[in-house]
């Protein structure tokens, strides 16, 4: 098993796609490196690029509140993105960029070894669950993939843009809490 230190060092020098040209900082990921729950977003925005940390802008503030609603916080989960460098003007990361960045994420997932993965938004859901994943129809449902359970919910930025989605997102959060708790109560038996 490789070390986090080696992975971070190798990733820091990545120039595998053109997104590296515009970055202030590469946004590797943050949180509990042996978390049972990993959250995967799209790519860094402006604040993330400036600070080198995922989800620290407005969407990140909402993500923090969402975690708090289900008795979690950043110390209990690991947070990463599909791409580690900011796409210009916050556009969606392209397929080629995600492909170039994919092995960093796969290696992070292997090291964290989470039982549960939550995709934040359509982009990571189409990459990690199914290419034709439909977030409006399939959010809140667990998919068993390998030995992990993966669920997608709305991206916090989408909830900021369209608050009418929040009640559905809240139901997804309850589902995540249920599964996370079940995992921990099973440990204690
Ligand atoms: N949106 C994402 O998908 N990731 C971040 O880190 C910030 C905003």
Image: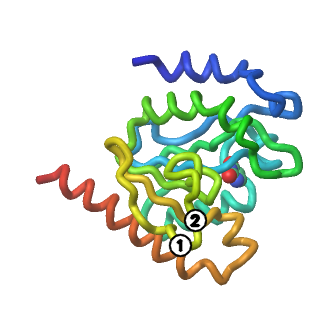
Which residue is identified by label 2? 134
Instruction: Please give the name of the residue rendered at 59% of the width and 29% of the height, measured from the top-left corner.
Output: 104
Q: Secondary structure at mark 2?
A: loop
Q: Quadrant of residue 13?
A: top right
Which colour scheme appears in the figure? rainbow
| Residue occupying the point 54% across, 54% down | 119
Extreme-left residue of the structure: 189
Q: In the rendering, which numbered label is found on residue 33?
A: none
Within 10 angstroms of label 1, few (less than 14), some, or many (20 or more) residues? few
Front one among 125 and 173: 125
Q: Secondary structure at mark 1?
A: helix
Q: Residue 41 location in percent, x, y?
A: 62, 50
Residue 155 falls left or right of residue 68: right
Which disc number belongs to residue 137?
Answer: 1
Residue 11 image position (x, y, % from top left): 65, 23
* Circles 1 and 2: CB atoms closer than 8 Å: yes
User: Residue 182, how many percent across, how many down?
Assistant: 25, 60
Q: Residues within 10 Å of mark 2 (few under 14, many from 20)?
A: some
- 82 over 69 or under it: above or below: above
**Location of residue 109 in the rendering, given as x and y in whole percent from the top left corner:** 47, 36
Compared with 121, 16 (above or below) is: above
């Amino acid at each position: 098993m490789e070390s986090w230190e080696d992975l971070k060092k190798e990733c820091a020098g990545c120039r595998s796609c053109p997104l590296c040209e515009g970055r202030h900082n590469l946004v590797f990921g943050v949180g509990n490196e042996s978390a049972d729950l990993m959250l995967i977003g799209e790519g860094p925005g402006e604040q993330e690029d400036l600070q080198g940390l995922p989800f620290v802008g407005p969407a990140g503030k909402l993500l923090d509140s969402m975690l708090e609603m289900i008795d979690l916080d950043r110390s209990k989960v690991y947070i990463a993105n599909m791409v580690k460098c900011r796409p210009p003007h916050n556009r969606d990361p392209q397929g080629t960029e995600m492909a170039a960045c994919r092995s960093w994420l796969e290696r992070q997932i292997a090291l964290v070894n989470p039982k549960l993965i939550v995709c934040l938004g359509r982009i990571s859901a189409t990459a990690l669950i199914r290419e034709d994943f439909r977030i409006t129809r399939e959010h809140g449902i667990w998919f068993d993939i390998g030995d992990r359970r993966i669920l997608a919910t709305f991206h916090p930025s989408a909830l900021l843009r369209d608050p009418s989605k929040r009640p559905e997102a809240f139901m997804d959060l309850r589902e995540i809490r249920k599964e996370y708790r079940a995992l921990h109560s099973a440990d204690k038996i």
